[in-house]
Amino acid sequence: MNTSTLTARQAGVGTAPSWAAPSTTALPAGTTLPPDDTRRYRRRTTARNLRAASLTVIGWTSVAAAVSLYLAYGGMYEFDALAHSLKALGIIAGLVATDLMCLMLLLAARIPYVDRAFGHDHAVALHSKLGAWVLYGLGLHAWLLLAAYAAAEGVGLVAEFGSLWTVPDFAIAVVALLLLTVVGVTSIVAAKRKLGYEVWHAIHLATYVAVGLSIPHQFSMSGLFADGTWQRWYWLGLYGATAFALLAFRVLLPLISTVRHGLVVSRVVREAHDVVSVEMTGRHLPELDVQAGQFLHWRFLADGLWWHQHPFSVSAAPTATTLRITVRNLGAGTARLMDVRPGTRVMIEGPYGIFSDQVRTTDAVTLVGIGIGIAPIRAVLEATDIVPGRATVILRSSTPEELYLVREVEALCRAKGARLITLVGHRAVRRNGTAAWVPASHAGLTLADMVPYLTRSDVYVCGPQAAADLVIDDALAAGVPAAAIHNERFSW
Amino acid sequence: MSTNSKIAAVLASAGILAAGWSVGTANGATVAAATTTAGGTTTSQTVGTGTTGSATTTGTTSGTTTGTATTTTPATGTTTTTTGTTATTSYKDGTYTGTTAVHRYGSVTVTVTISGGKISAVTAAVVDDGDRKSQQINSSSLPTIKSRVIAANSAAVSTVSGATYTTKAYLTSLQAALSKAA
């Protein structure tokens, strides 16, 4: 025990509800959902897994197709001399990288089908992972072909590089590669943090320029893409489909949603000194099909706000005419949001993500909201089916003031028969010196201690990622299947 | 990723690769056939699946080397009347066109002009595979091959490095033309 733990304990003093004293009485255990509900969960889970599996298979086979088309062109006959082998490998590296680039763009296109299969965060994570491979592939492509040409002509790499500038479209291809490298480097997490979202996003848009600059050399320098080959049509088709997906789902669909639903801020409620709930009214909202817990990208069309776009989860189950978000002032763009006025028009993109009732796998549920992460948890609690006595809501914050929406959550728990646990205070320090997610007042306490049916429940976790990860570790350690742990990572 | 989807991905990928391989082999056989029987027609251009490159006729253009390929002999391209140093063979005067020799990256058809029993001019109709790199290799190597042929007054000249396929096809076609002149 050190002094910091003591102060943390101090901070926890005065919070009325504690985990040991549930604010609602659980109904007798053993109550289960009617069988058709569990069957529904199972059906949805199977459908989602099938979607994810089919997309994964499509992704892998598209890589195989890229190589296969080269083989069909006679690529394997290239492996007869060193220079030719280098050339063939260079071409294959370029083709695979190009295919992966298309997959990256498709993952970033926010195609509803992909979103429902993987979830937005998983799609973005996959996008980042592929990004590294695209850069490796393109680097190999450049080096291998340079070496191949140099070997074929018996000149040095530098001389060959110099001679290539006279080949049409070579120069812009070099610029494209440099641009993509810059985009890749700035996307590395550390650089991203330093730059800030707006700068990073502007740089990321350079991807489109880079892709555009790289296309001419593929068709002019390569015999593979020559006029009349069906390889040419395949790649043109792939590019066309990718461009269409980006245009349709990232530009047109948001614009159509914005115009069709015409969301306008109708009410702003201050929940705490740095948190507001913004209620918006719109038309035909059932068609937008927002699931409680999902997020949208919001753009408030007011002075000083319109150029910022923010991802916020809905903090209440959507009604036929209203959507509500609860936002914490995290500086920069969100600061001005505290003063947004009723009547402000709102542009939307979304809804995105699978942090909702849609991913339930079983009848019991454990909802963990940390800090402002309470907002989506509150929405999920409101919308999801709850078997009395088989649901626990855990709210975690540093100070009682930061238990946002706690009164609403309490009312919902009471109405639906869920148990509420609030954990307030600064974090406990674990034996290995790192911080735990539970407060110092409850050091050593685990998720399994709080929820008896934990391993048979769906665990929803939302909050700052470091803390959320600790909760997830806790759940995994207790034996909760990974498929039953639901968490939306807010990454760009 | 579940085991089932892994198996499905592997099987689908293997199938697609096998299909590409078999198509490639089928086309490859055509290329080989076309190369060996290049004594037949002048239109037998079946390299790979796409061979509609642009035909560049050199010979009249006085050897403008655009690349930096290893040009050992300066490309003159003008009708250098032979000095008779290496002329061991004598041909019948006239103009003869060889067969089209198809190779991996295109094809070459050589037309040779004999005057005074010696090779006085060679022109080549070159078709490439549409690959700009092939075009660059062709445009930089053809003047060299040509000047070597005129100097040697035969098809027995060394290969231009970096342009092995083009040289070999060129010489095959040239030999066919010269045999008509024998």
Image (cartoon, helix red, strand yellow):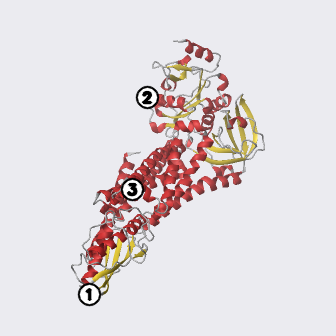
Gap between marks 2 and 3 measured at Cα: 49 Å
How busy is the neighbourhood of tag 3: few (under 14 within 10 Å), some, or many (20 plus)? many
Q: How many labels does the image show?
A: 3
Which residue is at 35% across, 50% downward? B7
Q: Do labels 1 and 3 share a chain?
A: no
Kindly identify the amino acid type of the residue bearing the numbered disc 3.
Leu
Residue identifier under label 2: A477
The residue closer to the viewer here, B71 or A346, is: B71
Can the viewer see residue A123? no
Q: Is residue A220 left or right of residue B163?
A: right
Kindly identify the amino acid type of the residue bearing the numbered disc 2.
Ala
Residue identifier under label 1: B92
- Asked if labels 3 and 2 touch by Cβ distance under 8 angstroms, the answer is no
Locate residue B130, reporting x and y percent: 42, 69
Report the mark closest to the observer, 1 or 3: 1
Residue identifier under label 3: A145
Where on the picture, by quarter, is residue B90? bottom left
Gap between marks 1 and 2 measured at Cα: 93 Å
The residue closer to the viewer here, A35 or A66, is: A66
- Relative to A244, is A200 above or below? above
How busy is the neighbourhood of tag 1: few (under 14 within 10 Å), some, or many (20 plus)? some
- Quadrant of the frame with the N terminus of chain B: top left
